[in-house]
Amino acid sequence: MKEVIFNVHDLVLIFTIFLCLSFACFLLFIKKGKKQSNFLLGAFLIAQAALPLDNLINFGEAFKAIALTVSPNLFYSFGLAYWIEAPLLLLYIRSLIYKDFRLTKKDLWYFLPFVLYTLHFTDNWLLLDHHLKMEALQGDGISSSTIADRITHIVRECLRFSFSVLCLIELHKYQRHIKHEVAELVSVDLTWLKVLVVGFLVIRVNAIFVALAIIFSYEIGIQIDHETLGLTSNYAILLLITSLIFFSAGHSTLFKGIDNELDSQLDSEKDKVADSFDPEEIKAIETYMEQNKPYLNHLLTLENLANQLTLSPRYLSTLINRHFEKNFFEFVNYYRIEESKHLLTLAANQKTTMLNIMDGAGFNSKATFNTFFKKLVGVTPTQYRKDYWQAQQ
């Protein structure tokens, strides 16, 4: 019982495997919600579990000995997950941010590198004679690898990095266009997911450095400590996976999907001259906003307002953007600022807190309230009320 089976570094990898597989099972078999998002995140986590297992088999002395007794095919096979986990994360993010997201045939192109490398791996490893495999596994896998293998390693890590950049682009697009569909951004805060995506991006940059360090060490003769770089990534991945599980479990339902067709339409119409809309229709919208005050609903969305006005969301969005020259977020919050100005000039509200004024005007965020008020009025809400009542004396 005193024999040391594995070290702390191995424990980090084992714990990462356990976390990934446990939450993947939870997503695939227990958790309710968006089934497609759960499936993609579960598949991503399974792929993430395969990566530390690949490290344990190829570089953990105790695990390497066990794997040799089972089958040499265990070596390098789990490394196929490197080619599939990045596109799975991208598709998971898209499934969160787009309404009615569906996997299409075009999405299969993301998995082409995985298919090509699997064919290469099958031909160059799995179909090799058993004796040749056992002979190849006797030495140090890193030092004995070919220059072609090392170049493939760099290509793989650059590909993973590219997918991380695509993830950031998707989040940026979501944050830019969500203002066309919601009037309150508190419930669609992306900070947690951005941190995770940036975290994976940094890890993939580090993986590129590891690949380059191996080439410098074994091909050029400049020794770089690639082992420490690799170990650092192992610990960072454990932290990121733990964060992903925590935040995705509690926050993924907060996403308000954007309409991809609406998004494309708005982009294509940026350079068009504003069309003329029916003046009576414009007047009816303004009258409805002033009399019915739908903006007092903290959770008002483009779809909600369109239903109240018996218009299509796409048409209403186009009208707001091209006639009022505002996005939906700005359009609704303009009326909220007008309401807050009215509330601040009521005698009964001279001592009312700004939080109550903000809430009474339909705002759900103090930061949004203060920012919009200062932008549209020129002074803070507090200063506006003070100036108003001083002028009445």
Image (tube, rainbow, N blue to C red):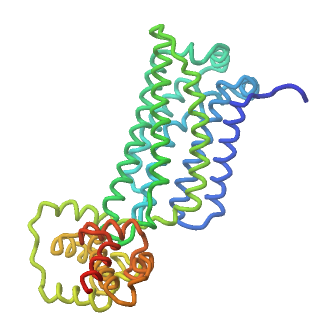
324 up-or-down from 2: above or below:
below
Residues 18 and 319: in front is 319
Residue 200 placement (x, y as % from top left)? 49, 41
Q: What residue do we see at 66% from left, 63% from top? A: 30
Return the residue nearer the eye: 205 or 23: 205
Position of residue 21 in the picture relative to residue 159 (left or right): right
Image quadrant containing the C terminus: bottom left
Please tell me which residue is depicted at 45% across the width and 50% down the height of the picture: 194
Say which quarter of the image contains residue 348.
Answer: bottom left
Q: If the image is split into quadrants, where does the N terminus sit?
A: top right
Q: In this view, does 169 lie to the left or right of 233?
A: left
Which residue, as the protein is rendered here, is positioned at the far bottom? 291
Relative vertical location of residue 20 with respect to residue 153 in this rendering, above or below? below
Query: Which percent across, then down, holds residue 297?
Result: 40, 82
The part of the image, by quadrant, that contains residue 383 is bottom left
Residue 358 in the image: state x and y as whole percent.
Answer: 40, 77
Outermost residue, front side: 393
| Residue 7 locus on image (x, y percent) | 74, 28
Extreme residue toward the right, this view: 1
Q: Please, is residue 164 above or below residue 3 in the view?
A: below
| Nearest to the observer: residue 336 or residue 226 | 336
Report the side of 137 relative to 328 (left or right).
right
Q: Name above or below for residue 240 compared with residue 270.
A: above
Q: How many labels, in total?
A: 0
- The residue under the point 50% across, 47% down is 196
